C-alpha cells in the first residue's frame, strides 16, 4: 500500500481546516442563498444592523445619553438636506437635541438585545418543556400541553402586556432603568415558548422509540443524560428556523410594548421608545424624529422575516 | 355528537377557570389590595378591619371561590385609579371597542377576499404583484407603525381625516354610544379601522389566494369548464364558494385577536375604548381592571374557539363520523 505523498497529506490536513467552509460553500443551502438576491440583500441588512448595534459606541458620532455632549440648543434640527440642517447631525436631532443617527444606533442595540435574549429565553423554556413532555409522556405531557394550548389561544402581545404589568407591580419602587430590560426579556420569553415546545415534543416522541435511545437506556444512562446528549441533538434542527422567524416577532413585540409606554424608558430608548417620542412631534412637522427610527424598525423586521422565510424553505427538503 | 359537545363545553369551562385562577393570583398577590386603598397614616387597626371586611384573611381557596362567584355576577371590584366599579368602566368603553373591531373585521373580510380572488385569478398581472408586496409589508410592519404612517399621510399632510378620538357620538339606549350615525363619527372610524384590520386583511388575502388556486386545479372546476359554464359562474359560483369555508373559520378565530390588538390601535388613535383603559391599567398597576380585562378577553377567546369547534362538528360529516367511533 503506497504511503500518501506529502501533497496529499497537506491536502488532508488543510481539508480538516477549510473542510467545513468548503462544504458550506458547496451545499444546497448556499446555492439557494446565492440564487436569491432578495435573501442576500436581507442578510446584508441584518448583518449591518447587528454590526451597527454591536459597535454603536464606536460608530455613533455622539453619545446621545451623555448630558455633557447633548445641548438643548441643538433641539429639533432637521436633516442636512432640509433648510436649517446642520452637517453635524446627518438626519437631524430630536426634541432634546440628541443626534438621531446616534440614538438609532443605540436604540438598535437595545432592540436587538432585548429581542435576541427574549427569543433565546423562549427557546430554552420551549425546548426544555418540549423535551420533558415528549420524552416523559403521560401526565407531564398532558399538563405541559394543556398549558400550551391555553396560552396559544391568546395573542402573544397580550400575554407580554400582562406579564409586564404584573412585573411592574412586583418591582414597585425599583427604577425602570434597572428592571425594564429583564422584565421585557421575561415577557417575550414567556409569550413565545409554545411553538418551540410543540415542535420539540413532536420530534422527541418520534426519536425516543428509536434503537439508539433504547441502547442508551440499556447501558443504564440516567434519563436526563439521554434527553440532553442523545435526543436533543437530533430534534434541535427545526428550532433554528423558528428562532429566526420569532426574532422579527420579538423585536416587534418589544417595540410595541415600548411604544405603549410599558417597555423601555426614554432615558434608555429602544427603537419603539424613539418612535413613541417622535410620534408626539408628528403634528408639529418634525417628521424626522419618528420617520427614521420607524423606517429602521420596518426595514430590520422585514429583512429578518425574509431571511426566516428563506431559511424555512431552504431547510425544507420537500421544496428543494 | 352530544358527548363531543359536552366534552368541549367542559374543556372550555376548565380553561376559563384556569384563566380566572391567573386573574385571581394577580389580584390577590401582586401588590396588596389593602395598601392601594388606605393612606400612609391609616392606623393599623383600621387596616386590619378593612382586611377582615374584604375577606382577605379567609383561606385562599375560599377567596378564590368568592372571586369566581363575583366574576359570574360581573363584579370585579373597584378600580384603584378611578375609584369606580370596574364593570361600569368597561361597559362604558365597550361600545367604542366593539364598533371599531366590527368595522375593522368587515374591512378585512371584504377587501381581503376581493384582493385574494384577484391575486388567484390574475396571478401574473402587475396589480396582483402589488397586492402581494402590500401583504408582505402588512405582515411585517408593526401595527403602531402603520397607524403612525396613516396619521401622517391622511391627517397631517392631507388633512382629510381626524387622528384622535371617536368624533361625535349618539347615545343609544341606556349605555350604548355609537359613532356610526354622525359624519364625524364615521370619519374618525376610517383610519383606526384600517390600521386594526390591515393585518387580518393580509392574512385573509393570502388564505383566499392559496385556497382559490388550490380549488381551481380540482376536477370539478375542469368539468365545469368542460360543461361550458361561463367563466364568471365558475369563478364565483363554484370556486369562491368552496374557498369561503376556511376563510370564515379564520375570520371568526381572528375576531378575538382583533379585539385584543385594539389595545395598540386605540393607543395610537387615542380611541376611548377598553384597550386604552387596559393599557392605562397596566401602566398604573390597576390590578382589578387588568384582571377583569383578562377574564373578558379569555371568555371571548374560549367562546369563539368553542363555537368554531362545534360548528365544524355540525358542518363536516367526516368529523361527525370520527366522533361517533
Image: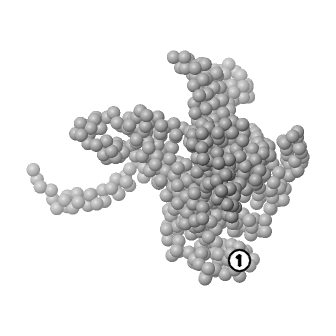
Give residue A36's position: percent from left, percent from top: 51, 52
Residue found 66% across the figure and 33% down from its top: B303
Res. B250 visible in picture: no
Q: Residue at x 20, y 58 (%)?
A: A8
Residue B310 pos. (x, y %) = 63, 26
The chain that hosts pointer 1 is A
How many residues crowd around disc 1 within 10 Å: few (fewer than 14), some, or many (20 or more)?
Answer: some
Spot the residue most to the left: A1
Q: Which residue is mark 1?
A: A75
Q: Report which quarter residue A64 is drawn in.
A: bottom right
| A4 up-or-down from A28: above or below | below
Nearer the observer, B110 or A260: A260
- Residue A66 appears in the figure: yes
Query: Does dot 1 land on a helix, a strand or a loop?
Result: loop
* Nearest the eye: B3 or A118: B3
Measured along the vertical axis of the image, is residue B3 above or below residue A311? Answer: above
The colouring scheme, among rainbow, by chain, secondary structure or one colour, is one colour
User: Image quadrant for the C terminus of chain A?
Assistant: top left
Amino acid at each position: 500500500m503506497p504511503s500518501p505523498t506529502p501533497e496529499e497529506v497537506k491536502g488532508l490536513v488543510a481539508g480538516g481546516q477549510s473542510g467545513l467552509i468548503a462544504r458550506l460553500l458547496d451545499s444546497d443551502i448556499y446555492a439557494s442563498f446565492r440564487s436569491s438576491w432578495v435573501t442576500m440583500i436581507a442578510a446584508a441588512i441584518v448583518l449591518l444592523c447587528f454590526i451597527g448595534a454591536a459597535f454603536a459606541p464606536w460608530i455613533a458620532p455622539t453619545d446621545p445619553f451623555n448630558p455633557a455632549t447633548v445641548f438643548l440648543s441643538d433641539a429639533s434640527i432637521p436633516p442636512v438636506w432640509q433648510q436649517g440642517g446642520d452637517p453635524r447631525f446627518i438626519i437631524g436631532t430630536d426634541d432634546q437635541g440628541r443626534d438621531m443617527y446616534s440614538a438609532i444606533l443605540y436604540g438598535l442595540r437595545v432592540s436587538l438585545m432585548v429581542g435576541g435574549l427574549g427569543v433565546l429565553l423562549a427557546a430554552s423554556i420551549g425546548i426544555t418543556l418540549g423535551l420533558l413532555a415528549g420524552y416523559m409522556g403521560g401526565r407531564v405531557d398532558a399538563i405541559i400541553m394543556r398549558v400550551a394550548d391555553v396560552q396559544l389561544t391568546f395573542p402573544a402581545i397580550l400575554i407580554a402586556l400582562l406579564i409586564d404589568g404584573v412585573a411592574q407591580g412586583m418591582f414597585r419602587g425599583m427604577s425602570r432603568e434597572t428592571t425594564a430590560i429583564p422584565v421585557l426579556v421575561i415577557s417575550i420569553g414567556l409569550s413565545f415558548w409554545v411553538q418551540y415546545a410543540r415542535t420539540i415534543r413532536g420530534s422527541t416522541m418520534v426519536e425516543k422509540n428509536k434503537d439508539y435511545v433504547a441502547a442508551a437506556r440499556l447501558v443504564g444512562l440516567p434519563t436526563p443524560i439521554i434527553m440532553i446528549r442523545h435526543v436533543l441533538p437530533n430534534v434541535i434542527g427545526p428550532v433554528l428556523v423558528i428562532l429566526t422567524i420569532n426574532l422579527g416577532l420579538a423585536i416587534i413585540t418589544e417595540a410595541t410594548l415600548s411604544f405603549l409606554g410599558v417597555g423601555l424608558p426614554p432615558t434608555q430608548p429602544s427603537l419603539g421608545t424613539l418612535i413613541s417620542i417622535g410620534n408626539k412631534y408628528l403634528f408639529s412637522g418634525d417628521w424626522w424624529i419618528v420617520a427614521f427610527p420607524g423606517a429602521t424598525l420596518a426595514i430590520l423586521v422585514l429583512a429578518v422575516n425574509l431571511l426566516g422565510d428563506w431559511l424555512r424553505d431552504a431547510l425544507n427538503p420537500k421544496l428543494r | 355528537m352530544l358527548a363531543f359537545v359536552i366534552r368541549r363545553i367542559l374543556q372550555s369551562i376548565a380553561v376559563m377557570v384556569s384563566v380566572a385562577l391567573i386573574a385571581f393570583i394577580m389580584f390577590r398577590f401582586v401588590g396588596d389590595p389593602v395598601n392601594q386603598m388606605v393612606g400612609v397614616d391609616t392606623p393599623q387597626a383600621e387596616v386590619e378591619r378593612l382586611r377582615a371586611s374584604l375577606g382577605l384573611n379567609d383561606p385562599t381557596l375560599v377567596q378564590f371561590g368568592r372571586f369566581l362567584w363575583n366574576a359570574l355576577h360581573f363584579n370585579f371590584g373597584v378600580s384603584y385609579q378611578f375609584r369606580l366599579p370596574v364593570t361600569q368602566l368597561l361597559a362604558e368603553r365597550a361600545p367604542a371597542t366593539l364598533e371599531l373591531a366590527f368595522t375593522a373585521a368587515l374591512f378585512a373580510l371584504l377587501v381581503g377576499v376581493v384582493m385574494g380572488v384577484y391575486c388567484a385569478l390574475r396571478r401574473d398581472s402587475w396589480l396582483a404583484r402589488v397586492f402581494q408586496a402590500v401583504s408582505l409589508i402588512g405582515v411585517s410592519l408593526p401595527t403602531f407603525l402603520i397607524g403612525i404612517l396613516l396619521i401622517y399621510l391622511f391627517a397631517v399632510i392631507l388633512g382629510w381625516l381626524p387622528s384622535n378620538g371617536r368624533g361625535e357620538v349618539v347615545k343609544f339606549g341606556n349605555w350604548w354610544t355609537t359613532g356610526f350615525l354622525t359624519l364625524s363619527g364615521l370619519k374618525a372610524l376610517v383610519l383606526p379601522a384600517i390600521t386594526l384590520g390591515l393585518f387580518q386583511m393580509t392574512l385573509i388575502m393570502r388564505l383566499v389566494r392559496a385556497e382559490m388556486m388550490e380549488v381551481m386545479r380540482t376536477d370539478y372546476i375542469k368539468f365545469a369548464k368542460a360543461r361550458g359554464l361561463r367563466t364568471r359562474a365558475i369563478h364565483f359560483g363554484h370556486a369562491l364558494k368552496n374557498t369561503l369555508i376556511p376563510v370564515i373559520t379564520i375570520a371568526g378565530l381572528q375576531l378575538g385577536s382583533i379585539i385584543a390588538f385594539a389595545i395598540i390601535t386605540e393607543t395610537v388613535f387615542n380611541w376611548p375604548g377598553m384597550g386604552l383603559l387596559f393599557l392605562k391599567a397596566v401602566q398604573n398597576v390597576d390590578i382589578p381592571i387588568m384582571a377583569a380585562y383578562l377574564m373578558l378577553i379569555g371568555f371571548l377567546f374560549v367562546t369563539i374557539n368553542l363555537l368554531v369547534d362545534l360548528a365544524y362538528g355540525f358542518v363536516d360529516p367526516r368529523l361527525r363520523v370520527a366522533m361517533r367511533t
